[in-house]
Amino acid sequence: MSKQQRREIPRFETPIFETHCHLDYLDEDALGETLQRASDVGVEKIITIAVSPGNLDRVRQLTRQAGHIWGTQGIHPHEAAHYDDAVDSRIRDALADERLLAVGEIGLDYYYDHADRAVQREVFERQLQIAVDLDLPVVIHTREADDDTRAILANFSDRLSRKGVIHSFTSSLALAEYCLGEGFSLGFNGIATFKAADNVREVIAATPPQQALLETDSPYLTPVPYRGRPNAPCYLPFVAEQVASCLNLPVEELLDHAWRNSHRLFFGDT
């Protein structure tokens, strides 16, 4: 799609909460511009996500850059081989910081298999236990691992009083229904706009608006009509439009749900 064919990013009246991005993947010089572009289209709160021992501290530092940035602490399944008792302690200690709202990004990824599956499962369980111990929500990544994700969550769900979100949801409708039934939220991003993502749109249509969250996972998964460019929080309005369409809701109503859902999950608002 040419630049001429790309419509401007819409600006809605309801504020937008970016629940999952990776601001530390940006060059330091680009951060200010990225935050300004997001603000210009109504993105008022942002959560930047930790994934490895190497970026735990950087994510924490980013939460000091602006008052509307929060973060998480956790180890992605790709990095599971680097999890040890020292990392576990670092995560636990850091989460005493009020700017760090959840344990994540944690979970299982059997698509890439960058770490041994047994190790992934152990590390996932250890970090779920952190969330139980600290009474925090979780941010979960799962790809091609539906059965084991469900089995592990079945052992922890009752003890996760704050539940959490299955982010960038691309798994089966069956796993979606299980997670929703357990009280988890589902996070949707630019994948929902992709031509081949009928499975994701089916899951969105089956998700109660009270359990839907919006995210970009930027700098990845840029939505149509800006696919091909690095993703950024400013593209969230396109995700909101697609999710609203799948739910047969006006965009403003969907955004109101997503704002309230995000606050309830991450800040404990009622």
Image (cartoon, rainbow, N blue to C red):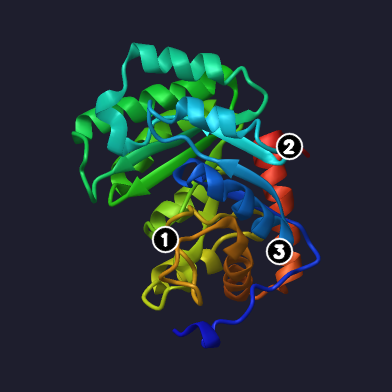
Which is more N-terminal, label 3 or label 2? Answer: 3
Q: Residues within 10 Å of mark 1 (few under 14, many from 20)?
A: some
**Are dots 3 and 1 in contact, CB under 8 Å?**
no
Where residue 41 sits: x, y (%)? 71, 64
Q: Picture quarter containing residue 42?
A: bottom right
Judging by the rendered image, the residue that carries numbered circle 3 is 41
Q: Is residue 231 above or below residue 83?
A: below
Q: Position of residue 160 (x, y in %)?
A: 54, 29
Q: Circle 1 is placed at which residue position? A: 173
Q: Is residue 171 left or right of residue 211?
A: left
Measure the C-alpha gap from mark 3 to mark 1.
32 Å
Q: Could you tell me the amino acid type at mark 1?
A: Leu
Kindly report which numbered mark, 1 or 2, lies closer to the viewer in this rendering. 2
Q: Residue furthest right?
A: 13
Q: In the image, what residue occupies the spot 46% across and 49% down?
A: 178
Q: What residue is disc 2 on?
A: 67
Residue type at the position of mark 2: Gly
Image quadrant where residue 264 sits: top right
Q: Secondary structure at mark 1?
A: helix
Element type at marker 2?
loop
Locate residue 219, reporting x and y percent.
46, 54
Mark 3 or mark 1: whose residue is earlier in sequence: 3
Q: Reply above or below: 43 against 100.
A: below
> Which of the two discs, 3 and 1, sits closer to the camera?
3
